[in-house]
Structure formats: structure tokens, C-alpha cells
């Protein structure tokens, strides 16, 4: 059974995992070589498709503050990334093969 990743068609690069606080920051990553970064994996094609839609919208930045009366306020700003174009990306299957470790 395959897992799925998001591949940039012109370069063959993949969208990598976001490493950070609680795996946040996924909207800030850019395609990278699979030899240099671990791909962000999805167990179903529809999850990859949904994530691609979110990622294409732009970088998501959280702004939070406390008002003078102590109330917490939080909002998300989406910063568009015009270079991200849906037609340049595809959902690609990844298959795992478990074998013996090299000596």
C-alpha cells in the first residue's frame, strides 16, 4: 500500500516535512531534493491533495496578543506566494521496501 508525497514536476523535488515546534511551519517549506530532506508523507491521496491546496494559498503566520483586560487574541495571516502554481505539482506515490541492513 503506497503513501503519498507532493512533487514539484519541473524539478522532481518534493515538499519536505516541517521540523519545528509541534511540526508547525509546513506552509513555509519549499520543494527540496529527496536526497537532502525527508518528504512529508500522507497515508491517503486525498490528504495530500488537501494539504497541497492549503500550501498553495501561501505562508500561514500566527499573530497573537493580550489586550489590556487580559483577553487573548489570535489571528492567522496568509501571505500569498505567487510562485506556487497548482499545475506545477502532483501527488506522487511512495512505496517502502524493508530489507536487511548493510553490514
Image (spheres, rainbow, N blue to C red):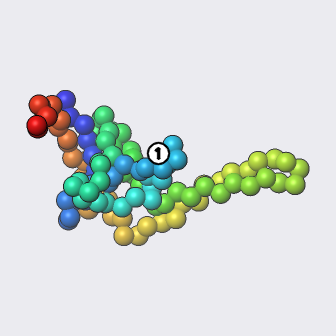
Q: Look at the image and tell me whether residue 64 can be seen.
A: yes
**Residue hosting label 1:** 23
User: Mark 1, residues whose alpha carbon is within 10 Å: few (<14), some, or many (≥20)?
Assistant: few
79 relative to 49 in the view: left or right: right
Where in the figure is residue 70, as x and y percent of width and height?
85, 48
Q: Position of residue 29 (x, y in %)?
A: 40, 58
Q: Residue at x 65, y 54 (%)?
A: 75
Question: On screen, 57 above or below 22?
Answer: below
Q: Position of residue 6 (x, y in %)?
A: 28, 50
Q: Secondary structure at mark 1?
A: helix
Q: Is residue 49 visible?
A: no
Q: Residue at x 76, y 48 (%)?
A: 72
Q: Is residue 22 above or below residue 89?
A: above
Q: Position of residue 11 (x, y in %)?
A: 20, 64
Q: Quadrant of residue 103?
A: top left
Residue extending farthest right:
69
Q: Residue at x 19, y 59 (%)?
A: 12
* Left or right relative to 86: residue 60: right
Location of residue 13 with respect to 46 vertically, above or below:
below
Instruction: Point out the residue furthest to the bottom here.
Output: 83
The image quadrant of residue 82 is bottom left
Residue at screen point 20% across, 41% down: 94
Q: Quadrant of the N terminus?
A: top left
Q: Nearer the viewer, residue 54 or 29?
A: 29
Q: Is residue 10 left or right of residue 72?
A: left
Amino acid at each position: 500500500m503506497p503513501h503519498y508525497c507532493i512533487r514539484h514536476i519541473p524539478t522532481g523535488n518534493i515538499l519536505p516535512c516541517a521540523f519545528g515546534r509541534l511540526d508547525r511551519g509546513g506552509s513555509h517549506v519549499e520543494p527540496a531534493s529527496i536526497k537532502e530532506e525527508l518528504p512529508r508523507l500522507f497515508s491517503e491521496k486525498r490528504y495530500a491533495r488537501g494539504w497541497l491546496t492549503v500550501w498553495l494559498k501561501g505562508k500561514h503566520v500566527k499573530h497573537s496578543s493580550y489586550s489590556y483586560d487580559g483577553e487573548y487574541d489570535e489571528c492567522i495571516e496568509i501571505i500569498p506566494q505567487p510562485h506556487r502554481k497548482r499545475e506545477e505539482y502532483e501527488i506522487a506515490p511512495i512505496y517502502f521496501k524493508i530489507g536487511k541492513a548493510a553490514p
